[in-house]
Image (cartoon, helix red, strand yellow):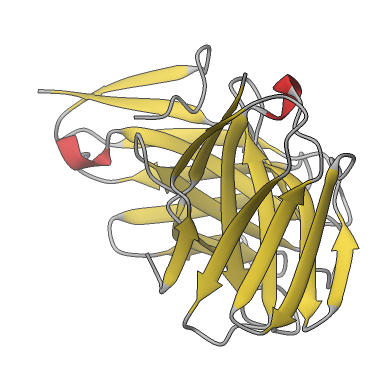
Amino acid sequence: DAGITQSPRHKVTETGTPVTLRCHQTENHRYMYWYRQDPGHGLRLIHYSYGVKDTDKGEVSDGYSVSRSKTEDFLLTLESATSSQTSVYFCAISEARDSGSEQYFGPGTRLTVT
Amino acid sequence: GESVGLHLPTLSVQEGDNSIINCAYSNSASDYFIWYKQESGKGPQFIIDIRSNMDKRQGQRVTVLLNKTVKHLSLQIAATQPGDSAVYFCAENATSGTYKYIFGTGTRLKVLA
């Protein structure tokens, strides 16, 4: 994994509780992403960041918020977890390039909401 | 490890044979495509990419072919090895020049000894 860590790696939480997942990179890449991966679905983008304090919504952003106060950290918060948010969450990073850039993924966080 | 898909299409290949994994994309405005490999319990790993001004690109033991006319992408793996067993999926950028990607659901490759 290209200098990307996620914490925690596993979490079990109860419905209605807030949860924050952390992504940390040591590559100084501009772009950071949060995805969720569920059986039968491809990776789906939740939110992404194109710079410090610059974020935008992805296709499944409802119920999630993000923050990026430093280049190296991108936080994903579930304000009030629901069972439908049980999933594996991946953080990814990419450099800024004019016509596309490969993404490097972290090891994932398995979140179970009971 | 985590299950990335319970009902993924599966390609079974004999060790040493070549593998071809296909992907259809939907967005004619996409101009950048990536193939990823995901092993059980791990994050996706970049394999190879291709831009829309190319039809073919080769890497180490892998080749990606792009057919823009029918919006089709394929990944060829030469001399498939047991370590190639994984889920493979393609990704396309959502629109030209953006860094949002759309991911396919993937194909499971099983290498038979």
For the question of whether residue A10 can be seen, the reply is yes
| Residue B15, position as x, y percentages in the image | 15, 30
| Residue A4, position as x, y percentages in the image | 46, 68
Question: Could you tell me which residue is drawn at 26 percent across and 40 percent down?
Answer: B84
Q: Is residue A55 left or right of residue B13?
A: right
Figure quadrant of the N terminus of chain B: top left
Q: Quadrant of residue B82?
A: top left
Towards the viewer: A27 or B83: A27
Question: Could you tell me which residue is drawn at 90 percent across and 40 percent down?
Answer: A62
| Residue B105, position as x, y percentages in the image | 62, 30
Q: Is residue B24 left or right of residue A51?
A: left
Q: Is residue A60 left or right of residue B71?
A: right
Relative to A87, residue A1 above or below: below
Relative to A63, residue A53 above or below: below
Relative to B71, residue B53 above or below: below
Question: Could you tell me which residue is drawn at 71 percent across and 70 percent down?
Answer: B53
| Residue A59, position as x, y percentages in the image | 86, 44
Figure quadrant of the C terminus of chain B: top left
Question: Could you tell me which residue is drawn at 86 percent across and 40 percent down?
Answer: A63
Q: Is residue A84 left or right of residue B89?
A: right
Q: Quadrant of residue B16?
A: top left
